[in-house]
Image: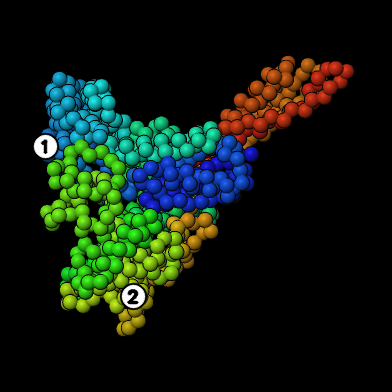
Amino acid sequence: MAYFLGVDTGGTYTDAVILDEAANVVLGKAKALTSRHDLAVGIGQAVDAAIAAAGVMASDVALVSLSTTLATNALVEGQGARVALVFLGFDDADLGRSGLTEALKGDPVIRLPGGHTHAGTEVAALDLSLLELMVRELGDDVSGFAVAAQFATRNPAHEIAARDLIRRVTGRPVTCSHELSANLNGPKRALTAVLNARLIGMIDRLVAACERHLAALGIDAPLMVVRGDGALISAAMVRERPIETILSGPAASIVGARWLTGASDALVSDIGGTTTDVALLRDGLPEIDPEGARVGGFRTMVEAVAMRTTGLGGDSEVHLVTEGLKGGLRLGPRRLMPVSLLAVDHGPMVHAALDRWLSSEAVGEMDGRFVVPMSGQRGGLNARELAVLERITHPMPMVAALTSRLEVAALERLVARGLVMISGVTPSDASHVLGRLADWDGAAAEKTLRLIAKRRTGAGDRFSTGPEAFAQAVIDQLTQQTVDCLLEAAFGEDQGFAGEDPQTLARHRLTTEGLAQHRGVVEVAVRLGVPVIGLGASAPSYYGAVGERLHCPMILPEHAGVANAIGAVAGQVSQRATGTVSSPAEGRFVAHMADGLQSFASSGAALAALEAALVGEASARAKEAGAVDLRVTVDREVKEVEIEGRTMFIEARITATASGRPRVAH
């Protein structure tokens, strides 16, 4: 019996599930906090608990599949390692195209003559000596390189030469644009290569952490990773091309949603700690985005599901809107560590700071915020940034880490580089105050919301009367922004509104009044025409109100909290072909093929021929059914008897099973 292990590593939680492939049921599941300092810790805790809950032996696991939102979260939050772009044959104007300058965020660019024409002929020779000199000058300032040459998809010679030189000189990872896409549009390929280079270290640490724990458990099974289109690629390949894992988690969640509910037409909305991912399920499948995945404002050349990803989750930053007299709230797109979570491991420090701040009538701008050091490459930091980073040796109040307002920008740069994480009030803290969650330190959450509620609006009034009222306001804002996300996706997929801006339509006065069922001289009613499948650990806490606002059925499956991990290994397309070999007379063996009978002089020849035919038939069926990454197993049942010391062949039955991950697209 084969057991599959699915693992999903998100920004807050790492989930693991054990599926019984034959019975297609969840045998065990578990959650653990994602351990940013060492991903192996969270993966290990989740995997161990899931295996224990399933009551199976680790050695019986036949396939491990990993999905992750880490790459998506990093791009949404503008984080990632510092890299250098080697730009061959392009001019300065090309840097301003396709969002390339924004994606670089001030990282170094080496621009040299080179590249090829549309026909693949060399435009200018590549000066490798000059390239080596410029690469050596960067020293330890970058963790990796992206190489993009003009028309490299027609002739990649310059990209390959540059890649080989950089690897020889620096030993650091290099991403070539032609390896990620065969399409034209050099600046867009360069953008994709830059983002890929930023993610290599992060995804390599994730895969290595998973491999280490699997080895420790004695699991000798293939490790696959879910791509953004729902297909699987090997762990070795994803280390070179981590960009393909953007929208990996959302793609897995769609497979999981289909597996959990059997729904054919619905909006799938997956809320995590950092993002909300929405896609339309039509006839059981989502569409592939023909223009390439868009994440964090960047349009890449990565093939992925047509997904709308918004920086809105349970751990989203709560912004106080102080402009105007009334004030208000806004959530995201950045993820913070909830104060209630920080207090689990650093309770005395957190509570002492909160008590101190609460004892004062005035609330400082940085009150209620903490900083947490993270590991990472420090190259390219200026003196001020290094000074701030060296001060943050352990979690501490933000105000203690800064000596002046001039250092705020330096801290933000450290956060963008992933070297420091901010802890502050989030919807997760609000849920603890309202009793919807009880996982972390509820007292710390209550103090934090009590503190922030004392802040003043532009009119001089307090934002809220107390922690409970403020917590409800945060949850109401999460509901509103989730409704906006779903409406944008719905308008974007509705062909009746083709050419219109979905964001504008979702926030139009008629839409908002229609949701409120306005009744007057004019009556307006708006509702979502398909059900919503709510996924994510916090979906049961938040999505009931969302369904009420949209006047549509809200489906919250039993295993919604681990849908991504389920989707990493569920939804297998499986096709079987069965045949028999008989022996109507001694020395004659007949294979019963689909296209007729074939006779053989030996049982071995007959079995081999039938097996080959059945493997081909099952594989063809599976491919026709939409399977990729086929896995073929063969089962033989041979009946023989002993007669006077001789083994007599009676009959054999062969079953070939071809299984594969469905490519989640029409």
Asked whether disc 1 touches disc 2, contact meaning CB atoms under 8 Å apart, the reply is no
The percent position of residue 488, horizontal first and vertical second, equals 32, 60
Where residue 152 sits: x, y (%)? 24, 28
Name the amino acid, label 2: Ala
In the image, residue 231 above or below residue 162: below
Counting from the top left corner in percent of width and height, residue 249 is at 41, 47
Relative to 646, is 544 above or below? below
Instruction: Give the x, y percent position of residue 652.
Output: 73, 28
The kind of residue on which mark 1 rests is: Asp
Residue 55 visible in image: yes
Q: CA distance from mark 1 to mark 2?
A: 53 Å
Say what secondary structure mark 1 lies in.
Answer: helix
571 vs 398: above or below = above
Q: Residues within 10 Å of mark 2 (few under 14, many from 20)?
A: some
Local secondary structure at mark 2:
helix
Which residue of the protein is positioned furthest toward the bottom in this rendering?
521
Which residue is found at the position 26% from the left and 60% from the top?
369
N-terminal of the pair, mark 1 or mark 2, is 1
Tell me the residue at 53%/59% (across/down). Answer: 558
Q: Within the image, what quadrant is residue 132 found in?
A: top left
Residue 620, located in which quarter of the rendered image?
top right
Q: For marks 1 and 2, give the one nearer the viewer.
A: 2
- Residue at 35%, 65% in the rendered image: 444
Asked whether 387 or 138 is in front, the reply is 387
Q: Quadrant of the N terminus?
A: top right
**To which residue does mark 2 refer?**
469
In this rendered view, identify the residue nearer to me: 384 or 83: 384
Q: Is residue 364 left or right of residue 9?
A: left
Q: What residue would you read off at disc 1?
A: 92
Q: Would you place residue 516 above or below residue 304 in this image?
A: below
